[in-house]
Image (spheres, coloured by chain):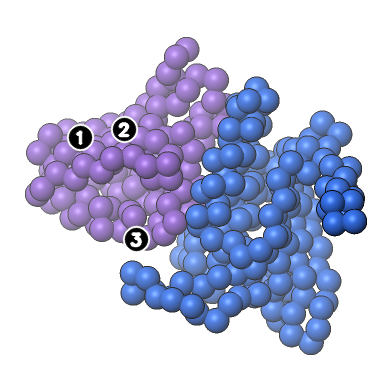
Chain colours: A purple, B blue
Amino acid sequence: MENILVEATDRTPQIQFDFAQNRFALRGESYPEDVAEFYGPKVRALAAHIGQLSGTRIEFHFELIYFNSSSAKVLIGLFDLLDEAAENNEVEIFWHYEADDANMQELGEEFGEDVARASFRMVAKGA
Amino acid sequence: MLAKQVLQFRELLFQEGILFCYSGYMTEEILSSIGNTLKQKMAMDKTDKNIARGVFTLFVEQVQNVIRYSSEVEPVARQERGGDVELRYGLLTVGQKQGKYFVSCANMVARQDVERLRGNLTKIQGMDREQLKAFYKEVLRGATPEGSKGAGVGFVDIARHATHGFQFDFHDVNDEYAYFCLKAFI
Protein backbone atom coordinates (compact mmCIF):
# COMPACT_ATOMS: atom_id res chain seq x y z
CA MET A 1 0.00 0.00 0.00
CA GLU A 2 1.19 3.53 -0.83
CA ASN A 3 2.43 5.38 2.27
CA ILE A 4 0.34 8.31 3.45
CA LEU A 5 2.23 11.50 4.25
CA VAL A 6 0.30 14.66 4.99
CA GLU A 7 1.91 17.85 6.25
CA ALA A 8 0.47 19.61 9.29
CA THR A 9 -1.65 22.74 9.01
CA ASP A 10 -2.92 25.13 11.71
CA ARG A 11 -5.88 22.84 12.24
CA THR A 12 -4.82 19.39 11.09
CA PRO A 13 -1.99 17.15 12.22
CA GLN A 14 0.94 15.78 10.27
CA ILE A 15 0.06 12.24 9.27
CA GLN A 16 2.74 9.62 8.63
CA PHE A 17 1.40 6.20 7.77
CA ASP A 18 4.31 4.00 6.74
CA PHE A 19 2.66 0.78 5.65
CA ALA A 20 5.96 -0.95 4.82
CA GLN A 21 7.50 -0.38 8.27
CA ASN A 22 4.15 -0.43 10.10
CA ARG A 23 5.04 2.82 11.79
CA PHE A 24 2.28 5.36 12.10
CA ALA A 25 2.11 8.84 13.57
CA LEU A 26 -0.24 11.78 14.12
CA ARG A 27 1.49 15.00 15.19
CA GLY A 28 0.15 18.47 15.87
CA GLU A 29 -3.23 20.14 16.14
CA SER A 30 -6.48 18.43 15.29
CA TYR A 31 -9.67 20.43 14.85
CA PRO A 32 -10.44 20.00 11.15
CA GLU A 33 -13.40 21.73 9.53
CA ASP A 34 -14.76 18.37 8.55
CA VAL A 35 -13.41 15.48 10.60
CA ALA A 36 -14.98 12.76 8.44
CA GLU A 37 -13.54 14.23 5.26
CA PHE A 38 -10.05 14.68 6.74
CA TYR A 39 -9.68 11.37 8.59
CA GLY A 40 -12.17 9.09 6.84
CA PRO A 41 -10.15 7.87 3.82
CA LYS A 42 -6.86 7.65 5.76
CA VAL A 43 -8.32 5.72 8.66
CA ARG A 44 -10.12 3.37 6.28
CA ALA A 45 -6.83 2.64 4.47
CA LEU A 46 -5.13 2.03 7.81
CA ALA A 47 -7.88 -0.31 9.01
CA ALA A 48 -7.77 -2.30 5.76
CA HIS A 49 -3.98 -2.65 6.04
CA ILE A 50 -3.84 -3.54 9.73
CA GLY A 51 -6.73 -5.97 9.37
CA GLN A 52 -4.64 -8.29 7.24
CA LEU A 53 -1.50 -8.28 9.42
CA SER A 54 -0.45 -10.98 11.84
CA GLY A 55 2.70 -11.58 13.87
CA THR A 56 3.84 -8.07 12.99
CA ARG A 57 5.26 -5.26 15.09
CA ILE A 58 3.09 -2.15 14.79
CA GLU A 59 4.06 1.23 16.24
CA PHE A 60 1.71 4.20 16.52
CA HIS A 61 2.87 7.58 17.83
CA PHE A 62 0.38 10.19 18.97
CA GLU A 63 1.97 13.58 19.49
CA LEU A 64 -0.96 15.96 19.65
CA ILE A 65 -1.04 19.52 20.91
CA TYR A 66 -4.78 19.93 20.90
CA PHE A 67 -7.71 17.94 19.54
CA ASN A 68 -11.39 18.81 19.54
CA SER A 69 -14.21 16.51 20.55
CA SER A 70 -14.96 15.33 16.99
CA SER A 71 -11.28 14.32 16.62
CA ALA A 72 -11.49 12.49 19.95
CA LYS A 73 -14.06 10.20 18.37
CA VAL A 74 -11.54 9.34 15.65
CA LEU A 75 -8.80 8.75 18.24
CA ILE A 76 -10.91 6.36 20.29
CA GLY A 77 -11.70 4.47 17.06
CA LEU A 78 -7.96 4.19 16.36
CA PHE A 79 -7.24 2.86 19.85
CA ASP A 80 -9.98 0.24 19.45
CA LEU A 81 -8.57 -0.73 16.04
CA LEU A 82 -5.01 -1.05 17.42
CA ASP A 83 -6.14 -2.94 20.49
CA GLU A 84 -7.98 -5.40 18.30
CA ALA A 85 -4.90 -5.81 16.07
CA ALA A 86 -2.87 -6.63 19.19
CA GLU A 87 -4.65 -9.96 19.38
CA ASN A 88 -2.28 -11.36 16.79
CA ASN A 89 0.35 -8.61 16.46
CA GLU A 90 2.78 -6.81 18.73
CA VAL A 91 1.25 -3.35 18.99
CA GLU A 92 2.88 -0.41 20.74
CA ILE A 93 1.09 2.89 21.20
CA PHE A 94 3.09 5.93 22.31
CA TRP A 95 1.30 8.98 23.71
CA HIS A 96 3.71 11.92 23.62
CA TYR A 97 2.88 15.06 25.61
CA GLU A 98 4.68 18.12 26.93
CA ALA A 99 5.70 17.47 30.54
CA ASP A 100 3.84 20.56 31.77
CA ASP A 101 0.68 19.78 29.82
CA ALA A 102 -1.58 18.27 32.48
CA ASN A 103 -4.56 18.11 30.11
CA MET A 104 -2.82 16.05 27.41
CA GLN A 105 -1.34 13.81 30.08
CA GLU A 106 -4.77 13.19 31.62
CA LEU A 107 -6.37 12.48 28.24
CA GLY A 108 -3.58 10.03 27.42
CA GLU A 109 -4.04 8.23 30.71
CA GLU A 110 -7.79 8.03 30.14
CA PHE A 111 -7.41 6.59 26.64
CA GLY A 112 -4.73 4.22 27.93
CA GLU A 113 -7.11 2.78 30.54
CA ASP A 114 -9.25 1.26 27.80
CA VAL A 115 -6.38 -0.29 25.87
CA ALA A 116 -6.18 -3.87 27.06
CA ARG A 117 -3.93 -5.86 24.71
CA ALA A 118 -1.69 -3.29 23.03
CA SER A 119 1.06 -1.65 25.04
CA PHE A 120 0.26 2.00 25.79
CA ARG A 121 3.20 4.15 26.81
CA MET A 122 3.09 7.69 28.10
CA VAL A 123 6.09 9.72 26.93
CA ALA A 124 6.67 13.11 28.62
CA LYS A 125 8.68 15.58 26.54
CA GLY A 126 10.92 18.29 27.94
CA ALA A 127 10.70 16.89 31.46
CA MET B 1 -22.30 61.45 18.46
CA LEU B 2 -21.31 58.40 16.48
CA ALA B 3 -18.01 57.97 18.30
CA LYS B 4 -19.68 58.57 21.65
CA GLN B 5 -22.29 55.91 20.97
CA VAL B 6 -19.71 53.36 19.93
CA LEU B 7 -17.49 54.29 22.87
CA GLN B 8 -20.43 53.62 25.20
CA PHE B 9 -20.89 50.24 23.58
CA ARG B 10 -17.18 49.53 24.02
CA GLU B 11 -17.36 50.57 27.68
CA LEU B 12 -20.27 48.21 28.18
CA LEU B 13 -18.15 45.39 26.78
CA PHE B 14 -15.18 46.38 28.92
CA GLN B 15 -17.33 46.45 32.06
CA GLU B 16 -18.15 42.83 31.36
CA GLY B 17 -14.46 42.03 30.90
CA ILE B 18 -14.97 41.13 27.26
CA LEU B 19 -11.76 40.66 25.25
CA PHE B 20 -13.37 39.35 22.05
CA CYS B 21 -16.87 39.93 20.81
CA TYR B 22 -18.26 38.76 17.51
CA SER B 23 -21.85 38.87 16.40
CA GLY B 24 -22.57 37.64 12.93
CA TYR B 25 -22.36 34.65 10.68
CA MET B 26 -20.04 32.03 12.09
CA THR B 27 -17.83 30.15 9.69
CA GLU B 28 -14.81 27.88 10.00
CA GLU B 29 -12.68 30.78 8.69
CA ILE B 30 -13.93 32.98 11.54
CA LEU B 31 -13.14 30.17 13.98
CA SER B 32 -9.56 29.92 12.64
CA SER B 33 -8.93 33.66 12.75
CA ILE B 34 -10.41 34.43 16.15
CA GLY B 35 -8.92 31.21 17.52
CA ASN B 36 -5.40 32.11 16.41
CA THR B 37 -5.73 35.65 17.78
CA LEU B 38 -7.09 34.34 21.07
CA LYS B 39 -4.08 32.00 21.36
CA GLN B 40 -1.72 34.91 20.62
CA LYS B 41 -3.39 37.13 23.22
CA MET B 42 -3.17 34.45 25.91
CA ALA B 43 0.47 33.72 25.01
CA MET B 44 1.30 37.43 25.29
CA ASP B 45 -0.45 37.57 28.66
CA LYS B 46 1.60 34.52 29.74
CA THR B 47 -1.63 32.75 30.61
CA ASP B 48 -1.01 29.38 32.25
CA LYS B 49 -0.73 26.78 29.50
CA ASN B 50 -3.45 24.56 30.89
CA ILE B 51 -5.87 27.47 31.35
CA ALA B 52 -5.12 28.73 27.83
CA ARG B 53 -5.81 25.26 26.42
CA GLY B 54 -9.07 25.11 28.37
CA VAL B 55 -10.22 28.50 27.09
CA PHE B 56 -9.34 27.46 23.54
CA THR B 57 -11.30 24.22 23.95
CA LEU B 58 -14.39 26.08 25.20
CA PHE B 59 -14.02 28.45 22.26
CA VAL B 60 -13.72 25.74 19.57
CA GLU B 61 -16.55 23.58 20.89
CA GLN B 62 -18.94 26.50 21.34
CA VAL B 63 -18.20 28.13 17.99
CA GLN B 64 -18.56 24.78 16.20
CA ASN B 65 -21.93 24.36 17.91
CA VAL B 66 -23.08 27.64 16.38
CA ILE B 67 -21.64 26.78 12.95
CA ARG B 68 -23.43 23.44 12.98
CA TYR B 69 -26.64 24.06 14.88
CA SER B 70 -27.74 27.70 14.99
CA SER B 71 -31.31 27.85 13.70
CA GLU B 72 -30.73 31.34 12.37
CA VAL B 73 -29.47 30.29 8.99
CA GLU B 74 -29.18 31.98 5.61
CA PRO B 75 -30.66 30.14 2.66
CA VAL B 76 -27.94 28.10 0.97
CA ALA B 77 -25.83 30.61 -0.92
CA ARG B 78 -23.32 28.38 -2.64
CA GLN B 79 -22.15 24.82 -2.98
CA GLU B 80 -18.65 23.62 -2.28
CA ARG B 81 -17.12 20.17 -2.41
CA GLY B 82 -20.53 18.75 -3.26
CA GLY B 83 -22.13 20.06 -0.06
CA ASP B 84 -24.26 23.07 0.77
CA VAL B 85 -22.45 25.93 2.41
CA GLU B 86 -24.66 27.42 5.07
CA LEU B 87 -24.22 30.60 7.06
CA ARG B 88 -25.41 30.42 10.63
CA TYR B 89 -25.72 33.40 12.93
CA GLY B 90 -24.43 33.55 16.47
CA LEU B 91 -22.91 35.76 19.13
CA LEU B 92 -19.57 34.96 20.71
CA THR B 93 -17.89 36.63 23.65
CA VAL B 94 -14.62 35.72 25.33
CA GLY B 95 -13.51 37.58 28.39
CA GLN B 96 -11.96 37.68 31.80
CA LYS B 97 -13.69 38.86 34.95
CA GLN B 98 -12.97 38.38 38.64
CA GLY B 99 -10.00 36.17 37.87
CA LYS B 100 -11.92 33.78 35.65
CA TYR B 101 -11.95 33.42 31.90
CA PHE B 102 -15.30 32.89 30.23
CA VAL B 103 -16.46 31.87 26.78
CA SER B 104 -20.06 32.42 25.82
CA CYS B 105 -22.05 31.70 22.69
CA ALA B 106 -25.65 32.46 21.91
CA ASN B 107 -27.84 31.51 18.99
CA MET B 108 -31.37 30.72 17.95
CA VAL B 109 -32.62 27.17 18.36
CA ALA B 110 -35.92 25.58 17.36
CA ARG B 111 -38.33 25.58 20.30
CA GLN B 112 -38.96 21.89 19.71
CA ASP B 113 -35.29 21.21 20.57
CA VAL B 114 -35.28 23.19 23.82
CA GLU B 115 -36.38 20.38 26.13
CA ARG B 116 -33.85 17.92 24.70
CA LEU B 117 -31.01 20.46 25.03
CA ARG B 118 -32.09 21.51 28.52
CA GLY B 119 -32.27 17.85 29.56
CA ASN B 120 -28.79 17.08 28.20
CA LEU B 121 -27.20 20.15 29.72
CA THR B 122 -28.87 19.66 33.12
CA LYS B 123 -27.68 16.05 33.18
CA ILE B 124 -24.10 17.05 32.29
CA GLN B 125 -24.13 19.93 34.79
CA GLY B 126 -25.01 17.50 37.57
CA MET B 127 -22.07 15.19 36.89
CA ASP B 128 -18.82 15.10 38.86
CA ARG B 129 -15.41 14.67 37.19
CA GLU B 130 -15.49 10.88 37.20
CA GLN B 131 -19.02 10.76 35.79
CA LEU B 132 -18.07 13.25 33.08
CA LYS B 133 -15.06 11.18 32.13
CA ALA B 134 -17.16 8.01 31.85
CA PHE B 135 -19.89 9.82 29.90
CA TYR B 136 -17.28 11.39 27.57
CA LYS B 137 -16.01 7.94 26.60
CA GLU B 138 -19.51 6.52 26.34
CA VAL B 139 -20.56 9.24 23.88
CA LEU B 140 -17.29 8.91 21.93
CA ARG B 141 -17.86 5.18 21.52
CA GLY B 142 -21.57 5.49 20.76
CA ALA B 143 -23.20 6.10 17.42
CA THR B 144 -23.44 9.76 16.46
CA PRO B 145 -26.75 11.05 17.86
CA GLU B 146 -29.64 11.89 15.56
CA GLY B 147 -29.31 15.39 14.08
CA SER B 148 -25.67 15.69 15.12
CA LYS B 149 -23.00 16.71 12.62
CA GLY B 150 -20.08 16.27 14.97
CA ALA B 151 -19.42 13.64 17.56
CA GLY B 152 -22.27 14.95 19.76
CA VAL B 153 -19.78 15.20 22.57
CA GLY B 154 -19.17 18.95 22.53
CA PHE B 155 -21.19 19.78 25.65
CA VAL B 156 -19.39 17.06 27.62
CA ASP B 157 -16.03 18.43 26.51
CA ILE B 158 -17.13 21.94 27.54
CA ALA B 159 -18.20 20.66 30.99
CA ARG B 160 -14.89 18.83 31.44
CA HIS B 161 -12.83 21.95 30.70
CA ALA B 162 -15.03 24.49 32.49
CA THR B 163 -13.28 24.25 35.86
CA HIS B 164 -15.66 26.88 37.27
CA GLY B 165 -18.75 25.36 35.69
CA PHE B 166 -21.14 26.64 33.07
CA GLN B 167 -24.50 28.38 32.89
CA PHE B 168 -27.15 28.09 30.23
CA ASP B 169 -30.51 29.63 29.52
CA PHE B 170 -33.30 29.69 26.96
CA HIS B 171 -35.67 32.54 26.11
CA ASP B 172 -38.66 32.10 23.81
CA VAL B 173 -38.54 34.51 20.88
CA ASN B 174 -41.67 33.47 18.99
CA ASP B 175 -43.71 30.32 18.31
CA GLU B 176 -40.88 28.74 16.39
CA TYR B 177 -37.61 29.84 17.99
CA ALA B 178 -35.94 30.32 21.34
CA TYR B 179 -32.68 32.11 22.10
CA PHE B 180 -30.08 29.82 23.64
CA CYS B 181 -27.08 31.04 25.58
CA LEU B 182 -24.26 29.06 27.17
CA LYS B 183 -21.48 30.58 29.25
CA ALA B 184 -18.60 28.48 30.53
CA PHE B 185 -15.95 29.55 33.08
CA ILE B 186 -12.33 28.64 33.76
In whole angstroms, how far apart are the C-alphas of marks 3 and 2?
A: 22 Å
Inspect the image, locate mark 2, and give the three-letter code of the amino acid beneath it: His
| Residue behind mark 1 | A23
Tag 1–tag 2 contact (CB < 8 Å):
yes
Image-quadrant location for residue B110: bottom right
Point out the frontmost of discs 1 and 3. Answer: 3
Per the image, label 3 sits on a secondary structure element best described as helix
Residue B104 percent location from the top left of the image: 73, 52
Image quadrant occupied by the N terminus of chain B = bottom right
Please determine if labels 1 and 2 lie on a single subunit: yes
Output the chain of dot 3.
Answer: A
**Which numbered disc flags the more N-terminal residue, 1 or 3?**
1
Which residue corresponds to mark 3? A37
Identity of the residue drawn at 45% across and 14% down:
A126
Is residue B62 placed above or below A57 in the rendered structure?
Answer: below
Mark 1 or mark 2: whose residue is earlier in sequence: 1
Residue B176: image location, x then y, percent? 74, 85
Separation of marks 1 and 2 at Cα, in angstroms: 8 Å
Image location of residue B42, percent across then percent down: 64, 31
In this image, B20 relative to A103: left or right? right
- Counting from the top left corner in percent of width and height, residue A123 is at 40, 22
Q: Residue at x 74, y 41 (%)?
A: B19
The residue tagged 2 is A61
Query: What's the residue at 33%, 54% (across, down)?
Result: A39
